[in-house]
Amino acid sequence: MSKPVIGFAGMTHLGINSAAAAAGQGAETVCFDTDATVIAQLKSGKLSIVEPGLPELLEQNNSRITYTAESGDLKRCGVVYISADVPTDDQGQSDLSGIRSLIDTVAAGLGRAAILVILCQVPPGFTRSLSLPKERLYYQVETLIFGRAVERAMYPERFIVGCAEPGRSLPQALQDFLSVFGCSILPMRYESAELAKISINCCLVASVTVANTLAELSERIGADWSEIVPALKLDKRIGPQAYLSPGLGLAGGNLERDLATVLRFSEATGSEVGLIESFVKSSRHRRDWVLRTLHTEVLAANPQAVIGVLGLAYKENTHSTKNSPSLALIAQLKPWRLRVHDPVVQASAAGHPEAAGCVTALEAAQGVDVLVIMTPWPSFRDLKADQLARAMTGRTIIDPYRVLDGKAVVAAGLNYFTLGAPPFRTAGRGTHA
């Protein structure tokens, strides 16, 4: 039996990485987008997104990939995924109008026996509400993580598949495609699968909130959260993969969207959500840690300080700036002069009238009174503390994600602030040991 042709509709971050993984697993793949410009760029090898390994994966499997802006080209596909990103507003509300329009476009051109799978994240009830034959309609939980999209798409832990009747076998074409990934397939009703994605993210939020809460306590009582984390990961009830690194609240949008979805459903159904409300409150508090530290340690004494900012992307190994902690911080620094650098994102993304773009991280540190490392890009780990000390005018580094070695920074004559630990100060000011 020949392998099914797999289609992906929507060449956004989710779509292009998912399609690349399908081709990488040996499937003939059709990549469709309604925007002919997007398709033209893909055909020419130009990517608008940054993901480690993605250009190489697409190039290696180019012979199995067809790029098209014609929905009729999906007719030869046995399975078609709706794989466009879902935009969200500042309140975490998803705008599903584009997804509905894309579904209508794709459904009109499907082959008679083709399976349609909703891959993009939608709220519970969305899939069942679609006016499509339920025996050919499925929902699959996406596992996209910015900066790790290729890895997650190529090597998923499991597939969660929403069905109209989970007791029935999956259609052969869908079963054959999913089976090549060699992981468990968990069929369940549509609403369970849609809520499963939200449930996963709520559990992640719980871990992040615990880490942030106890990391802040560590900062204030002389403990070091990084010393505690290994003990927790050796506990079988918590595990080695637990999300225990402290951060600046919840970033990226998807976690916040899922919390907002739970809050909306609870309001409609009367379920109790005090825990979810506490997650949101904790995130908002922790988000401003850098700003509070800046004012306390530098700006209160030096209102004319020049601030260096390393990193604009919302996390390392991605081009995305949506919900970026760095941009949120910069928005609060309008009165101050900035020197900024990011390996991928242009300085213009900062939207700051006094932000000078710098070619290198060391250049961004030149003459600044304080240096803030807002995105933990791997290249920043190569910075030498003594070089930073010579370049800077001031003596303060704020490094929430602990990119640098705090002890080396102090040895170079600088004060160092990071999440989860008391300040590392130069001799005479209570140096952290």
Image (cartoon, rainbow, N blue to C red):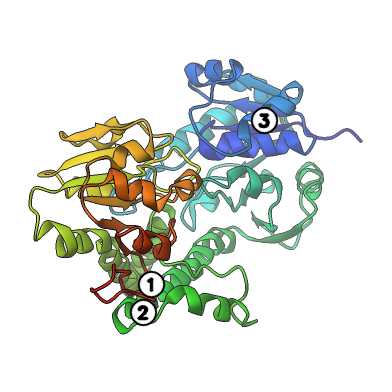
Between residues 243 and 296, which one lies in front from this camera angle?
296
> For the residues carrying marks 2 and 3, which lies nearer the camera in this image?
2
| Local crowd size for mark 3, using a 10 Å CA cut-off: few (<14), some (14–19), many (≥20) | few
Determine which residue is flagged by label 2: 218
Rendering coords of residue 231 (x, y %): 57, 81
Q: CA–CA distance between discs 1 and 2? A: 5 Å
Judged left or right of residue 36, residue 385 is left
Identified by mark 2, the residue type is: Ser
Q: The residue tagged with tag 2: helix, strand or loop?
A: helix
User: Between disc 2 and disc 3, whose residue precedes?
Assistant: 3
User: Between disc 1 and disc 2, whose residue precedes?
Assistant: 2
Residue 346 in sight here = yes
State yes or no: discs 2 and 3 in contact (Cβ < 8 Å). Answer: no
State yes or no: discs 1 and 2 in contact (Cβ < 8 Å). Answer: yes
Q: The residue tagged with tag 3: helix, strand or loop?
A: helix
Identified by mark 3, the residue type is: Glu
From this view, report whether residue 257 is shown above or below residue 131: below
Q: The residue tagged with tag 1: helix, strand or loop?
A: loop
Between residues 78 and 24, which one lies in front from this camera angle?
24
Q: Quadrant of residue 251?
A: bottom left
Identified by mark 1, the residue type is: Gly
Q: CA–CA distance between discs 2 and 3? A: 43 Å
Determine which residue is flagged by label 1: 420
User: Between disc 1 and disc 3, whose residue precedes?
Assistant: 3
Determine which residue is flagged by label 3: 56
